[in-house]
Amino acid sequence: KIRLNTVLNKCGRRGSRAGNALGALAMMYSLFDAMAGTFEVDHHLGGYDINPLLAATATGLVYKSTQGPKTMALAAVIGGGLVLATTAAKTVIPSPFHNKGILFF
């Protein structure tokens, strides 16, 4: 019973920390995506839908900006890479949910 309580306490502590971090990332991504849409960045860069890539890269840069330039660059590459992987999966894997907007597909 004591071990179960210890596990639950640690999960509660780490879960709230992870939830706060994911919430902050989601808010920053939404902000940067809306800013890119407002300034019509995709129209200036050839008409490609580049807004999600820019938003993810900027989110990584800003989120880890206090950790130094190496960590900022790594976070930006990870964010951009996740968006590129999602876009590649969307184009390669056929899905019946493409038009429904479920799970980024």
Image (tube, grey):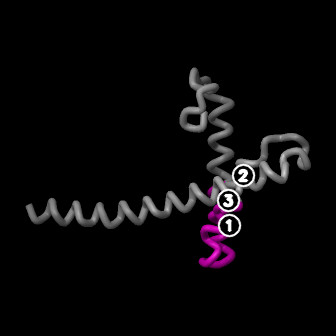
Work out whether residue 90 or residue 22 is closer to the camera in this orientation and state it: 22
First of labels 3, 2 by sequence position: 2
**Which of labels 1 and 3 is toward the front?**
1
What residue is drawn where x is 84% and y is 46%?
A: 42
Secondary structure under the numbered disc 3 in the rendered image: helix
Disc 3 marks which residue? 77
Name the residue at the left extreme.
1
Q: Amino acid at mark 3?
A: Val
Work out whether residue 105 or residue 101 is closer to the camera in this orientation and state it: 101
Q: Are marks 1 and 3 in contact (CB under 8 Å)?
A: no
Disc 1 marks which residue? 61
Q: Is residue 103 above or below residue 54?
A: above
Is 86 left, or right, of 48 in this rendering? left
- Pinpoint residue 7: horizontal percent, then vertical percent: 22, 62
Mark 3 → mark 2, Cα distance in angstroms: 20 Å
What residue is drawn where x is 54% and y is 62%?
A: 24
Secondary structure under the numbered disc 1 in the rendered image: helix
Which quadrant: the N terminus? bottom left
Secondary structure under the numbered disc 2 in the rendered image: helix
Disc 2 marks which residue? 34
What residue is drawn where x is 58% and y is 24%?
A: 95
- Residue 61 lies in quadrant: bottom right
Q: Amino acid at mark 1?
A: Leu
What residue is drawn where x is 66% and y is 68%?
A: 62
For residue 18: magenta? no
Residue bounds of the magenta highlight: 58-79
- Pinpoint residue 6: horizontal percent, then vertical percent: 19, 66
Name the residue at the top extreme.
96
